[in-house]
Amino acid sequence: MKNKILILTALGLGSVFAGNASAASYVSSNAATKTATLTVDASQGTAGGGLNFNGAVKGAKSFTVPAGWNVVLNFKNMGTLAHSAAVVKGSTPPLNVTAKELAFPGAETKMVMQGLAMNAADTVKFKASTAGTYLIVCGVPGHALGGQYLGLKVVAGAKAATYQ
């Protein structure tokens, strides 16, 4: 069994099978291209009754991204309910996600209000052009208010993206 865990860990799969993915599996940085890649898995486990991102609820976890960098947000719905993701302004989840609430052009999955079906995925690309405090929320009505959101800080002078 110990050898199997070591092999899975070497392949980067050990934490997935252990049920507790590491922070490194949710974020990577490429300083040369000024690109941060974020992973947001909707309904990963039962926290928040399934209304969670990466297993965290109510902004308990947060990404930090250097200001001016390009962001690639890889989204996957792991739950049975429909979910989506959108980057919105401020630190309070909005009642509904509309174009007015979006923090950056293009910073939302397809079907943001309806959500994507179980096992569906989408890749969102945007530029984190303005330093500030934002949220990554589920755009399905009621989900963000139910706690399905993560923090996003865009920080001038940051050297790499992080997840804590």
Image (tube, grey):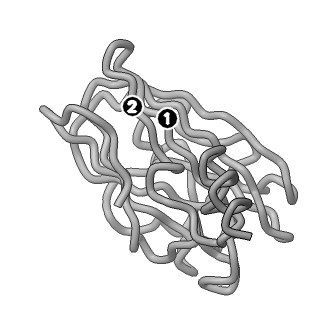
Residue 157 location (% of width, % of height): 12, 32
Q: Are marks 2 and 1 in contact (CB under 8 Å)?
A: yes
Q: Residue at x 69, y 54 (%)?
A: 8
Q: Which mark is residue 72?
A: none
Residue 64 location (% of width, % of height): 31, 47
Check disc 2 and give the amino acid type: Ser
Nearer-the-camera pick, 160 or 112? 160
Q: Residue at x 85, y 54 (%)?
A: 119
Check disc 1 and give the amino acid type: Thr
Q: Which mark is residue 37?
A: 1
Q: Quadrant of the N terminus?
A: bottom right
For label 2, the crowd category at 10 Å Cα-Cα, with few meaning under 14, some 14 to 19 and many 20 or more, is some
Q: Quadrant of the C terminus?
A: bottom left
Name which quarter of the figure residue 54 lies in: bottom right
Left or right of residue 128, residue 11 in this image: right
Nearer-the-camera pick, 51 or 28? 28
Left or right of residue 13, residue 145 in this image: left
Q: Residue at x 57, y 81 (%)?
A: 146
Nearer-the-camera pick, 60 or 145? 60
For label 1, the crowd category at 10 Å Cα-Cα, with few meaning under 14, some 14 to 19 and many 20 or more, is some
Precedes in sequence: disc 2 or disc 1: 2
Left or right of residue 1, residue 71 in this image: left
Residue position marked by numbered label 2 in the rendering: 29
Residue 119 lies, with reference to residue 20, above or below; the image says: above
Residue 132 location (% of width, % of height): 23, 46
Real-space CA distance between mark 2 and mark 1, rounded to the nearest whole angstrom? 6 Å
Helix, strand or loop under label 2: strand
Residue 18 location (% of width, % of height): 65, 71
Residue 43 lies, with reference to residue 70, above or below; the image says: below
